[in-house]
Image: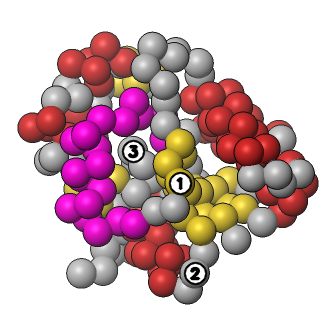
Amino acid sequence: MHFIFDLDDTVINSSHRQRFINGELDLPYWKENNTPEKVLLDTLLPLANVWRKAESVGHEIVICTSRVFTNTDYKLLKSFNLEYDHLISRPENDDTSCGYLKLRQLAEWQGDLFFSWDDFTNNSIMFDDSLDVQKVLRANGVRVICPNYYNSRKKLAA
């Protein structure tokens, strides 16, 4: 089984680097606050417990994030002891909406593994807080769970 995790607002709390305007993420503000010093202030959310449990019983862990990954992001995951099998992240200078970006990247990744889309969707579960991602991926057969309720009700295990 593939357990696919978004990072921001799903497994990682990076709210100290976010600002919203009319309900939309202020991307220039996000980029401005995406400094190594500020990234390393990110914290874990309770859904990290699900990640760790899935990993401990042998499920494949996939990160699928809209972040443009940097060395600091790798350092952050290592500091949280979050192990993963595959990392899918936003290419530099790609402004595709999150939903279509993740759909395209997941389709490319599963195709590289020689799975049919049906096999992939039947053996995958994704956690993502983005309504856009939920809408686009669900419309294409991916099971997507919104982590908000879980993160608001559970506590992070030590």
Query: Where does the magenta region start and end?
Result: 65-83
Real-space Cα distance between discs 1 and 3?
17 Å
Could you say which is closer to the camera, residue 73 or residue 126? Answer: 73
- Residue 58 is marked as 2
Q: Examine the rendered structure and indicate whether residue 50 appears above or below residue 131.
A: below
Real-space Cα distance between discs 3 and 2?
24 Å
Pointer 1 local density, CA inside 10 Å: few below 14, some 14–19, many at least 20: few
Amino acid beneath label 2: Gly
- Asked whether residue 2 is drawn in magenta, I would say no
State the residue position of label 1.
86
Q: Is residue 132 left or right of residue 119?
A: left
Q: Residue furthest bottom?
A: 57
For image coordinates 50% across by 76% down, the residue present is: 55
Residue 15 seen = yes
Amino acid beneath label 1: His
First of labels 3, 2 by sequence position: 3
State the residue position of label 3.
8
Could you say which is closer to the camera, residue 119 or residue 143? Answer: 119
Marks 1,3: beta carbons within 8 A: no
Q: How many marks?
A: 3
First of labels 1, 3 by sequence position: 3
Q: Quadrant of the N terminus?
A: bottom right
* Dot 2: element: loop
Real-space Cα distance between discs 2 and 1?
14 Å
Q: Position of residue 154 (x, y in %)?
A: 39, 74
First of labels 2, 1 by sequence position: 2
